[in-house]
Amino acid sequence: MIFGILDRYILKKYLQSFFFTVLIFTMIAVAIDFADKVDSFISEPCTKEEIIFDYILKFIIHINSLLWPLFMLISVIFFTSRLANNSEVISILNAGVSYRRFLRPYLVGAGIISGVLLLANHTIVPKGNRTRIDFEQTYVWKNQDQGKKEDIHMFISPDTKIYIQNYNQRDSFASQVKIEKYEGNVITYILNAKKMKWMGPPGNWQLSGYVGRVIDGEREYLNVGLRKKLDTLINLTPNDFVQFLNAKEQMTTNELKAAIAKQKQRGLGTPKKFEVEILRRTAEPFSIIILTLIGVAVSSRKIRGGMGLHLAMGISLGAMFVFLSKFSTTFAFNSGFSAILGVWLPNIVFFVIAVILTMRAQK
């Protein structure tokens, strides 16, 4: 593919406008977020280095990963509308350049930005979120976690199941614990304990008020320690009960896949929020290409009202895309709707819109 003067000119304008848009909106977002949290920064014992490098820098990465598709749409409409108002688009098309050929540098630029966002979504952004959210949980939002704390059933190994009636996160105490071991479909061992206390990694727990039953056919053997304590290793940690509200944002894609495999092994099924998060990280970069096609088709025609009307149309389409994206993702997460269809539905709908607008664009 020969990349000529026209391609370099449009690609340069494309990238310049995009990064200028990113800079402006990032500064606005940081200013608003800082104003919202400045009281916590002053009252809590956090240093300037922590605020800048652990929070603000990571917040910039986070907000850009969410809004790059919208920034891309605004920047494409901004500079393409200027080309149209200056009659540059008409001159390019009248010179014999086809509309498809005119789109090529746009698609190259969109491909570059999409590739960067795809890589960042799966690796860089989650690692940054881990530092940012840890800072927020330490200095801004305290005790903002949730988890399963009552009537907990899970497999801790392929042949061992645990039941816990109540779990207290604050002191890592579990009460009314029952552990069952199986051989095939037959129970071979049952351990009941009044309390179970976390003693530290890798999986040290202390049982108190316990009764163990070994079942061998029709015979049973008891091991009673109602007033004793038993130290034992169990493939379980406090993190298996309680997860932070945005745990999925802090995990790389490989870590999410490992968490899904672990949940399946414990008989808890596939955590849909993890599945949706992995799909979202791949779907969003592709939306940049789709919104680029829409932005060019909307703004390449010279119309009365100029850039203002183009921007109004583009921002309206962008708002519709964001709304549909959030609605379909939430719907997929909270219902029996297919996760992959829920995440990719906005891209499918707006790809159809992009095709229609491209076919009707000024040729």
Image (cartoon, grey):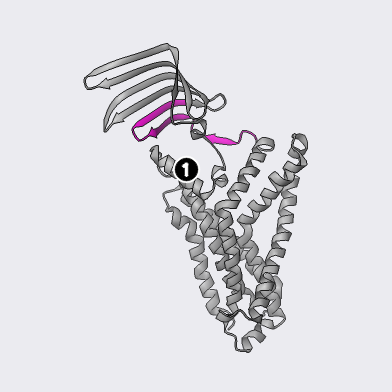
Q: Secondary structure at mark 1?
A: helix
Q: Is residue 143 magenta?
A: yes
Which of the pair 301/46 is nearer the observer?
46
Where residue 357 appears, as percent x and y from the top left, is: 55, 75
Q: Classify residue 36 as left or right of residue 243.
A: right
Farthest-out residue, top: 227
Task: Give the labeled residue for mark 1.
Answer: 259
Whether residue 265 appears in magenta in the rendering, the answer is no
Amino acid under label 1? Ala
Q: Residues within 10 Å of mark 1 (few under 14, many from 20)?
A: some
Viewport quadrant of the N terminus: bottom right
| Residue 257 in view in this figure | yes
Q: Is residue 309 visible?
A: no
Residue toward you, 353 or 188: 188
Quarter of the image for residue 251 reads top right
Outermost left residue? 218
Q: Quadrant of residue 72?
A: bottom right
Left or right of 363 on screen, residue 26: right
Work out whether residue 319 or residue 291 is closer to the camera in this orientation and state it. Answer: 291
Q: Main secondary structure of the magenta part?
A: strand
Looking at the image, residue 19 lies above or below residue 34: below
Q: Which residues are magenta?
A: 142-166
Q: Position of residue 350 (x, y in %)?
A: 52, 66
